Structures are given as structure tokens and as C-alpha cells.
Image (tube, helix red, strand yellow):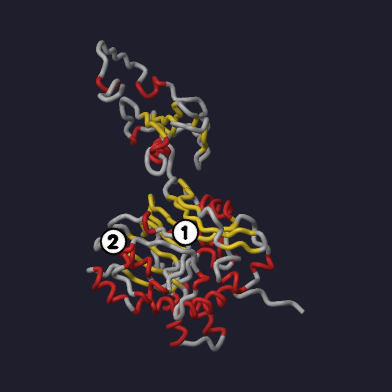
């Protein structure tokens, strides 16, 4: 007799419905939040918060933030204080019981903080176009009783996603705390492209999640307790990073990684990591005579577009790559070499992407550069250098 596959959505809904009413210690790793932000948040929310990391330090004032799997609302209410009255925080969760808990204290928290810039919505985090509450309201008003009803509902569902719940290119930074692992295996492929879609060009992610050091075998993935407990749905660690790469992110960094595993099951270690990454490497490559010198300590490194940077060598790069490598998170790793005479972007020719030769100094200084100095500059020997 065949056994029906595990319904991971139902397992997660069941587990977190209970956890929204009674604290469940097994659902979270210890996380130390800034106590200054917790004063405005009721104890009931703090006791029902389940996570494995803290992505909030990566958020800046005035930003629009999307929290995937917002749960009890704790992270959203912390972010509300960080981004300030000019910022905006959007919480997305699929569990109505967790959303009800977050909304229960919404007004009181806003009054304590001094502004209300938080909104909560019910949706799948791998489908940020569809408002689940709108669909359920439609089904309550017009239940599906025939095939014609079904076709009508499908048309409504497509219309409900246009415009999408979370618009294209509308978010400065996406954060998440121990939720991506709860997405069903066949839906995980939609997750990262959807995150990429909603981010602005130049937008960022800060994702805390549980990863495994080995692939999780099928019999563990079929264990409902392990799945809803943020274990058996975990990404293998290197596969987690590759998923960011495949979606088009760059500057992918393991910002935090717990030294000790949170849990070990059948010899497989599960631990918390926080990964940051950026969107915005698309666009044409233009030649503006720019170069960068990699500082070291490695002999050479390769970036996300396969540019090889050799220590101490002026490497020719296009304008787009120059802007990326002289900005966070790379800027402290290179010395920028802008041209002596700027090439207007409108006049810039296509960059030769096949080029491997270093940038000759005369390309940045100019062929006719003939300056001669008769006196040492102060910049050579700054005061204080012995």
C-alpha cells in the first residue's frame, strides 16, 4: 500500500497554530535582540517568536522592508523602530493564527513606538503576488460548485495577482528568520526568483535560516515533526548559497554562522546561518578606462561574474563592475583606479568582456599624459608615518 506524501503546509499550519497560543521551545534557537527595541513589544509576542538569527542589524533608517514569515510580528515591530517614521515594514505570513497574534497588538505597539508603518498580509512567501485573504473572501462569497465556477475563480485568481500584492522592484531589503526551510520542496525553486522580483535594483537581502551540512535524506523529509520543527526542510549549506547565485544575486556573504549545530539528527548537523546578498548586476558593460587593484591577502579571487582579480594587479573592468566593486560589500577589498579624464557614459563604447590583460597605466592616465613633478607631494608621506 502506497503512503501519501507529507503535506508540509498542513504540518506547518498545525504546529504553528499551537505555537501561537503556547510557547514551544523546540521551534527556536536562542536569539539576543537589542533590549531597547523590545520595550514597546508585548510579552505575548516575544514569547511566541520563533527564529534562529537576527537579520535586523542589516536594515537602515528610511527603508522599505519585507519580512518573510513574519509570525508573531516581533521582527516587524523591531524594524518599525529601526526604519523610523519615513520607512515602511511589510510582514508576510501564511498562518492566520500567527497573523492574528501580530494584529492583536498592532495598535498598542504603534502607540508606544510613536508611528504606525507596519502592515501584515497573508500570502505564501514563494508567491508574493497573491493575497490569500482576497481569494478566501471570494470563495466564501462564491463557492466552487461546478467547473464553470472553477474557471471563473481561476480568472479571478489571475486578476487578483495583477497588480501583485508586493509590487516588482518595490522593496529595499528583504529579511527572513528561520522560514525559508518551511517551504515545500517543489516550491523552493520559486522562492529566490520571487524575492529577486520584489527588490529594487541595488536592493538587499538578510536571511537567517537553518542549513544542514549534508543532504537531508527522504525519510527525514517525510517526518512531519522534523519538517515543522525547521529541521528536515533545511537547505544543504552550499546549495543554499547556490540558490542565491542562480536567482542573480551578487555579493553573497555568510554574515553569521553558528559554530555549534542547533540540532544533530542521524549524524547530520543543522545550524543557523545569516546570509546577505544584493541585486543589481544587470545592465550593459561600457568601457570607461576604469580598473581596480585587489589588496589581498589571497593571490587571486573571482567575483560573481567570473572576473579574476589578482593581488596588486590593475584589472580592467567595465563601468558597471567598477561601480559594484567600489561599493559594499567589496569596497574595502580593492583600490579604485578611475581615469584621469572621465569618459562620459554617453560616449563609452562596449567593454570587451573577453579581455584578460591588465589595464595599462596609460589607459587610465591617457596616452598623452606628460605631467612632471619637481617636488614631493604631502600625500606621499602623511604626518605620523615613521
Tag 1 residue = 208
Residue at 28%, 61% in the rendered image: 87
Give percent across and percent down for residue 51.
46, 65
Tag 2 residue = 87
Mark 1 lies on a secondary structure that is strand
Query: Is 259 or 178 nearer to us in this picture?
Result: 259
Q: In this view, does 281 lie above or below 65?
A: above
> If the image is split into quadrants, where does the C terminus sit?
top left
- Quarter where residue 269 is shown: bottom right
Residue at 35%, 56% in the rendered image: 59
Mark 2–mark 1 Cα distance, whole angstroms, equals 22 Å
Q: Is residue 30 above or below residue 23?
A: above
Mark 2 lies on a secondary structure that is loop
Horizontally, residue 3 falls left or right of residue 373, namely right
Give percent across and percent down for residue 19.
48, 77
Residue at 39%, 28% in the rendered image: 289
Give percent across and percent down for residue 57.
36, 55
Q: Earlier in the sequence, mark 2 or mark 1?
A: 2
Name the front one of labels 2 and 1: 1
Amino acid at each position: 500500500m502506497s503512503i501519501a506524501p507529507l503535506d508540509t503546509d498542513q504540518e506547518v499550519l498545525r504546529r504553528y497554530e499551537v505555537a501561537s497560543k503556547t510557547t514551544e521551545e523546540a521551534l527556536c534557537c536562542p536569539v539576543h535582540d537589542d533590549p531597547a527595541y523590545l520595550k514597546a513589544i508585548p510579552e505575548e509576542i516575544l514569547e511566541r517568536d520563533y527564529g534562529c538569527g537576527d537579520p535586523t542589524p542589516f536594515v537602515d533608517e528610511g527603508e522599505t522592508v519585507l519580512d518573510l514569515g513574519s509570525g508573531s510580528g516581533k521582527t516587524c515591530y523591531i524594524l518599525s523602530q529601526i526604519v523610523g517614521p519615513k520607512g515602511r515594514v511589510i510582514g508576510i505570513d501564511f498562518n492566520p493564527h500567527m497573523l492574528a497574534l501580530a494584529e492583536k497588538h498592532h495598535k498598542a505597539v504603534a502607540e508606544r513606538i510613536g508611528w504606525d508603518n507596519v502592515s501584515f498580509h497573508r500570502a505564501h512567501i514563494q508567491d508574493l503576488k497573491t493575497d490569500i485573504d482576497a481569494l478566501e473572501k471570494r470563495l466564501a462569497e462564491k463557492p466552487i460548485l461546478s467547473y464553470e465556477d472553477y474557471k471563473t475563480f481561476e480568472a479571478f485568481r489571475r486578476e487578483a495577482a495583477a497588480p501583485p500584492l508586493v509590487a516588482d522592484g518595490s522593496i529595499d531589503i528583504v529579511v527572513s528568520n528561520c522560514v525559508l526551510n518551511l517551504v515545500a520542496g517543489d516550491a523552493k525553486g520559486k522562492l529566490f526568483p520571487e524575492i529577486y522580483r520584489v527588490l529594487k535594483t541595488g536592493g538587499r537581502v538578510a536571511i537567517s535560516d537553518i542549513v544542514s551540512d549534508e543532504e537531508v535524506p527522504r525519510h527525514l523529509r517525510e517526518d512531519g515533526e522534523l519538517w515543522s520543527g525547521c529541521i528536515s526542510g533545511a537547505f544543504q549549506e552550499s546549495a543554499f548559497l547556490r540558490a542565491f547565485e542562480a536567482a542573480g544575486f551578487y555579493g553573497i556573504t555568510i554574515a553569521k554562522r553558528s559554530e555549534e549545530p542547533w540540532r544533530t539528527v542521524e549524524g547530520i548537523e543543522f545550524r543557523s546561518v545569516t546570509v546577505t546578498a544584493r541585486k543589481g548586476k544587470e545592465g550593459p558593460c561600457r568601457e570607461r578606462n576604469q580598473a581596480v587593484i585587489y589588496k589581498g591577502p589571497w593571490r587571486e579571487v573571482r567575483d560573481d561574474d567570473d572576473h579574476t582579480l589578482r593581488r596588486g594587479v590593475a584589472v580592467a573592468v567595465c563601468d558597471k563592475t567598477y561601480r559594484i566593486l567600489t561599493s559594499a560589500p567589496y569596497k574595502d577589498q580593492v583600490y579604485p583606479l578611475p581615469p584621469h579624464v572621465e569618459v562620459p557614459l554617453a560616449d563609452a563604447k562596449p567593454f570587451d568582456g573577453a579581455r584578460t590583460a591588465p589595464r595599462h597605466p596609460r589607459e587610465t592616465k591617457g596616452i598623452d599624459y606628460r605631467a612632471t613633478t619637481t617636488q614631493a607631494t604631502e600625500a606621499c608621506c602623511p604626518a605620523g608615518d615613521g
